[in-house]
Amino acid sequence: MAAAKAEPHEPPAAKEAIRARAQALGFEAVGFATATLAPRHRAALLAFLASGSHGTMDWLARNPARRADPATLWPAARSVVAVGLSYAPAENPLAVLARPDRGSISAYARGRDYHDVLKGKLKNLAGFIAARFAAGVKVFVDTAPVMEKPLAERAGLGWQGKHTNLVSRRHGSWLFLGEIFTTLALPPDPPHENRCGICRRCLDACPTNAFPAPYKLDATRCISYLTIEHEGPIPEEFRPAIGNRIYGCDDCLAVCPWNRFAEAGRDARLAARADLAAPPLAELARLDDAAFRARFAATPIKRTGRNRFVRNVLIAIGNSREKALAASAAPLLADPDPVVAEAAAWAMRHLSAAP
């Protein structure tokens, strides 16, 4: 991004001006770090990839050197402005798990696509930095090769919890993260102390035992991975544990004790849509491609595509023990997509065996 003529400034004053602008734009968390990461982060990334824990997320394995080292990604960068935008739900996102005829959608996906909301705010903040301080800037949301959680931890936004996600004392586990790399040298904030202590609620809450150890995730067992990233049939061993989770899983996030301090997110665009809070499985099973695209336009769900989503719906139907839902699954036995047809057959078998 082109930079305008700079105003005279001292680094601490520049930092506070940037923080004030970020808060005015609605970011609940703002922090600053040098554009570096410790060698242990690179080592952890390489070990994660070597173990195959990333599954079919091949994009994670591309250019790991760039992902693990901001200086490699952009050598001119001197500082990182890390920001957090709260999406804390107003209601308990796990409540719908007790309604087997309804689908559970992860809290982050019940409103507008956060990429659009976050990137718009970040570009505004980056433009302010470029114009005010004649600094080069680059904006990153989670589609870029950036280790956003370690950078947010270094910038004092929180710490990576035992579930590997960022935890904030003020916002719990409910923060969307974004970064601005800049050529401007800014004093870093102190990194946040890890405050998980002996708590292991997030680990114990996982329905599929996706955490082989604290601070380690095997994505191939994670319901969020299986329902969102994984394209083929979901391994049968995990299907019963998925329950009615049709897009993502909030269990490890929602049980974190630090969430008790979190207030509901303030950006109305991220608020849960009424039709996504607990949608009827029977209704979702009828979606063709056009209806799917229309219903989930401007949400994160749209990128999964109709076939993957309906596959998830059929697994939830099979888990429901609601025999009336067989009428919704049966037409999909002849679906043109073989993954959908297989999931329909599995659902029918499980419904027929239900008492």
Image (cartoon, rainbow, N blue to C red):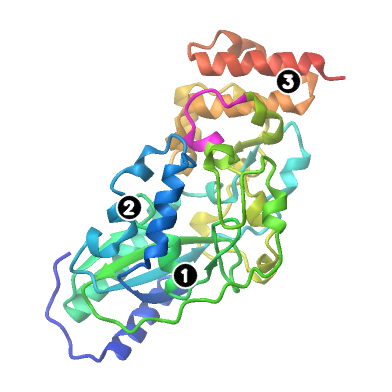
Of circles 1 and 3, the one toward us is: 1
The residue furthest top is: 334
Q: For mark 3, what is the residue? A: 325
- The answer to whether marks 2 and 3 mark residues whose Cβ atoms lie closer than 8 Å is no
Front-lying residue, 288 or 176: 176
The numbered mark, 1 or 3, whose residue comes first in the sequence reads 1
Kind of residue sitting beneath label 1: Glu
Residue 101 appearing in the image? yes
Within-10-Å neighbours for mark 3: few <14, some 14–19, many 20+ = many
Circle 2 is placed at which residue position? Answer: 145
Q: Nearer the viewer, mark 2 or mark 3?
A: 2
Q: Amino acid at mark 2?
A: Pro
Q: Counting other residues with Cα less than 10 Å from the Cα at mark 1, is it few (<14), some (14-19), or many (20 or more)?
A: many
The local secondary structure at tag 3 comes to helix
Span of residues in magenta? 226-235
Please identify the dominant SS of the magenta region. loop
- Judge left or right: residue 177 versus residue 81: right
Quadrant containing the N terminus in the rendered view? bottom left
Say which residue appears at 71% left-offset and 30% top-offset.
Answer: 240
